[in-house]
Image: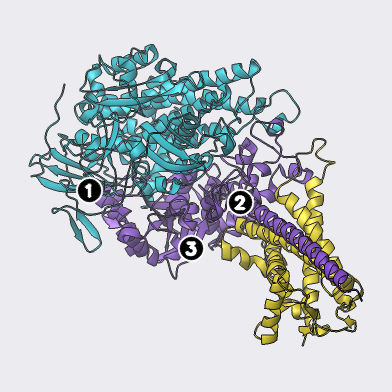
Chain colours: A purple, B cyan, C yellow
Amino acid sequence: MSILTRSKRVITTAEVMESRGINRREFLGFCSMMAVMLGLGPEGSGKIAQAMEVKPRVPVLWLHGLECTCCSESFIRSSHPQASDVILSMISLDYDDTLMAAAGDQAEAIVDEIIRDYKGNYILAVEGNVPLAHDGWNCIVGGRPFKSRLQETARHAKAIIAWGTCAAFGCVQAARPNPTQATPISQLVEHVPVINVPGCPPIAEVMTGILTYMLTFDRLPDLDRQRRPKMFYGQRIHDKCYRRAHFDAGQFVESWDDEGARQGYCLYKLGCRGPTTYNACSTIGWNDGVSFPIKSGAPCMGCSEEGFWDRGPFYERLQGMQQFGIESNADMVGKAAAVGIGAAVGAHMAVSVAKKALQGRKDNASDEGNPS
Amino acid sequence: MTVLPTPDASGRRVIIDPITRIEGHLRIEINVDDRNVIRNAVSVGTMWRGLENILKDRDPRDAWAFAQRVCGVCTGIHALASLRSVEDALAIKIPENANLIRNIMTLTLYAQDHLVHFYHLHALDWVDVVSALRADPAATSTLAQSISSWPKSSPGYFKDIQARIAKFVGSGQLGPFRNGYWGHPGYKLPAEANLMAVAHYLEALEFQREMVKIHTVFGGKNPHPHWVVGGVPSAINVHNTGAVGAINMERLNLVVEIARRTQEFITQVYVPDLLTIASFYKDWVQWGGGLSSMNLMSYGEFPGRANDTSNDNMGMPRGAIIGGDLSRIHEVDLKDPSHIQEFVDHSWYKYPDEGKGLHPFDGITECDFRLGPAGKIDKDFLTQVDETAKYSYVKAPRFKGEAMEVGPLARLVIGYAAGRADIRQLVDGALKKLDVPLSALFSTLGRTAARGLEAQWAADRLVTTVNDLIANIRNGDINTCATEKWEPSSWPATAKGAGYCEAPRGALGHWVVIKDGRIANYQCVVPTTWNASPRDAKGKIGTYEAALMGTPMADPSRPLEVLRTIHSFDPCLACATHLYGPDGEPIVDVKVV
Amino acid sequence: MGYQRLPDDGDLPPQRIFDWPCRAWHWINALLVVVLIVSGYLIGTPLPSSSGDTSSLYVMGWLRFAHLASGQLFALGFLFRVYWAFNGNQYSWQLFLPTFWKKSWTDGFWAQIKWNLLLLKLAPRYVGLNPVANVIMLVLFVLPSLLTILTGFAMLAEVTGHDSWQYFCFGWMVSIFGNTLDLHLLHRLCLWALVCFTMSHIYIAIREDAVGRQTMVSTMLSGIRQYRR
């Protein structure tokens, strides 16, 4: 079928619409509808129209390393924009192991074609991370270690999106003792900007939000020190938590399913990581804003934070200090030290008093022996 | 009883890597004879993560979160298996509401996961997207209306969908449909059926995100909802002040509504599509059966009452069928060391005493990536594996020495053999509609159909389970979590437990050993470990391998037939190959208190 | 100058050691440390849940206010004390810098250890800090204080956000650890270091007053050290 042969000159979305009998007026109507959908306001419509007239959809290669595919699953849960709109109208998702029709050689060929045809102009999205142990053979894709595949595709990418805590920070397979030496993307890539979108998984609308931001404004989002987009990761869950009032009031869930839990009190005492977690759960919410863990009575685990797996136990406010023994934390170590010092002070006092008394008696005895 | 053909590796070797539209990384190598019939099949799991080792020394109450990250597609089910293993070890009894809510979570997962699998991971093996451009929207509408009362079926609707595909294809940027096997002689659907399926591909993509909102209500998010040892994290408050901070009437209504719509979508879209597509591919009842006509296993799922693991209490019964004898259902005991064993003779791990299998409580694994003499690595390119030596990151689990098939087909057949009326009615109805005998189930098509029928079963049961939950709350029970054994001080010094589950993809077991309040050993044997298993010490081939044998291919360079059969299992490789701890000391038997 | 051990024998004239800014800092600081320890402990390990109307309760709110306010005063005090190390009298920098490279200092250190182990009959007498006190103050007070201030402001930067001056000045702490839960852990450990310091400091000061041959507590009040034979 001729329509399937890849044309060298890529047709813009506007041209496609025109060829399908959609006139200029209808096209602009579509753009303003998109602008509303993206929350860009009236001025956004012009930008979209312009983008569609001049630009082919940006090719996206979505690679999977060591991961659990929760990021892809989250992505397809996006409600605004819907995942199907992103895939069919906004980007060109040319390679994604989870969704693509092609397999084997036909799939691998796409990677080479995209690198050849869109050098420096495609987005590389990476889900999962790279095992360096065993020469990289702990993750083989297309017969090659994932490490080689990543480096080859990263080199010519315009930007890299590291989806999820795996790609951004290492996540579960990098937790102690990290048997495969799972390594985050940003540590393996040079000269290409990496955007970390952490979360296990990230919120669907945050994922699509970052993509559409890049397409709409044709720029990378502003990042913080950990390369996270400030717009979604700039504030802690705690800062915008609807249970914050209970925290300030000192009203806590003391144990599971207690009266406090039924009242929706603050989960701080059950180890909630909201105060140390930068994410948009408490504002955007999950799955079209239906809920987020705290709203469903579960303390936040801090899944978008670096190394959160090794900051357990999850249901204690203070993280464990296993080097001081099982079940230890800072309070136990501190209290032990304070008790130790207290005991030392007591013992010291007792010995000095005893010695003094002894000394006194001796002095008295010698005084008596030598009357002046 | 059918006998499996012996693998014959003399023909042309064809390598398919990666197998896409699955979870994780899988490679299939086949040999075809001069008539392009598959005579040898090799299933290679190509990733290894190491979760069980990472779980060591953690707090058992945290284990579910780690275990859940085994897989984000069948999200939640590993958490449930983990909770059950810890609760089994510590003899924790969960409240009825917790049991009902966990069942609701799992039923939702079945319905959603099966739906996503059918439309987004499997359908493109049967549906030619490009052919949909030639369809007549009016005829498509007639077809749709003849099979279902689903309202989105007007000619205008299909015309719009067609225009959308045309625009997309016309852009020259085919995205996920690029380089697909379009025009392959294996595609048999008329253009109208293709157009209808593409429309439903898009509708299902939209609707699946509605379904998971049930997880979001009770677990706060999806993928990876939150759980808790001893019950569920969400408290219930329907009568009093503060109910807005808990599971209240509004939340329950949301769940009721989604359950109802789920049932509607599956009844009116998924199942009719499935039966329609199946009716054009009846030749596929001949191929892909593999072990399904012989060895099937299920651990049982959906306990009606809390804390009762007896087989009568299970919505989907437990049991194993060996050698195709449907008249005898073998009991499956996760703790019996002679029942479940794992072998590594053909896996990239080493045992001190290879050739012997180990029960998960005694599991050992140490990564040992090396190829046999016929295996080749050219610089950093793995050209070929050697199936006579080690060749996969998946271990070879065996039940009483036999490779087993697990999954929806296994569950339905075991339920059918056990005489469960609900399952018999469901299966017989579908067989009658397609006009095929029961043996048709033992095939690629049968496996795919079983999944759809099970989705129907799950959606129906979801509706009734939500009603059960509301009834239980109405009876005055609002407990959701048992906390008497929350503190580690209330635990015995050592304990071990096994957690059973039936994941959407099949039998899932987690085994935990707890010492001094910490995890001393943790092992999972997951559905895809069973199905994607390599050969074992005796050379018995794995489930995927068996299923591929004898399948004729139209064009081995466009391996559509392989994808059909492999996808019919719904592979989940992150699950299968996560890792087993490197420390392999047999654990001394300890009393479970 | 600064550290100086005095002869064991004979009467010694009183010495002016702590100038008034130093003494004022000491007592204000002592008060702040107590408030910080108590409020800090209760923030990490809150009181049992309060019942009642959420909008009129502010238990954690006040605790956090007390902690954050006294914490910032504590930091200002610390800054002042560093400044005063350069501008105060000859003893004012001792707190920050033990002269451990000087033989007189190490001799004094061992002598003081012996005295504390009850091996010496006569308590050594000093102008300024004794070497052991000097080490304890550095290890259990100055360093934990510095760390507690750094981690404290880094955590405050979390509250005030990425665009705040706190984040600008202290956000690098976040980058060092990655996960800010580590800041909480360090901060908490510093709390316990300060608890340990407070206990040993008070005991030793009172004991020196009672059985040693120089005044301690009153010196910190009046600035003048009296010596006994």
Are the two marked residues, 2 and 1, in contact with CB atoms closer than 8 angstroms? no
User: Quick one: B318 or B315, which is closer to the camera?
Assistant: B318
Can residue B272 be seen?
no
Around disc 1, counting alpha carbons within 10 Å, would you say few (fewer than 14), some (14 to 19), or many (20 or more)? many
Q: Which chain is indicated by disc 1?
A: B
Q: Which residue is mark 3?
A: A194
Q: Which mark is residue A258?
A: none
Q: Position of residue B516 (x, y in %)?
A: 50, 41
Q: Secondary structure at mark 2?
A: loop
Which residue appears at 25% of the width and 14% of the height? Answer: B327
- Examine the image and state in which quarter residue C97 appears: bottom right
User: Quick one: B170 or B50, which is closer to the camera?
Assistant: B50
Q: Which residue is mark 1?
A: B391
Badge 2 or badge 3: first in the primary sequence: 3
- Examine the image and state in which quarter residue C54 appears: top right
Q: Are marks 3 and 1 on the same chain?
A: no
Which residue appears at 43% of the width and 69% of the height? Answer: A190
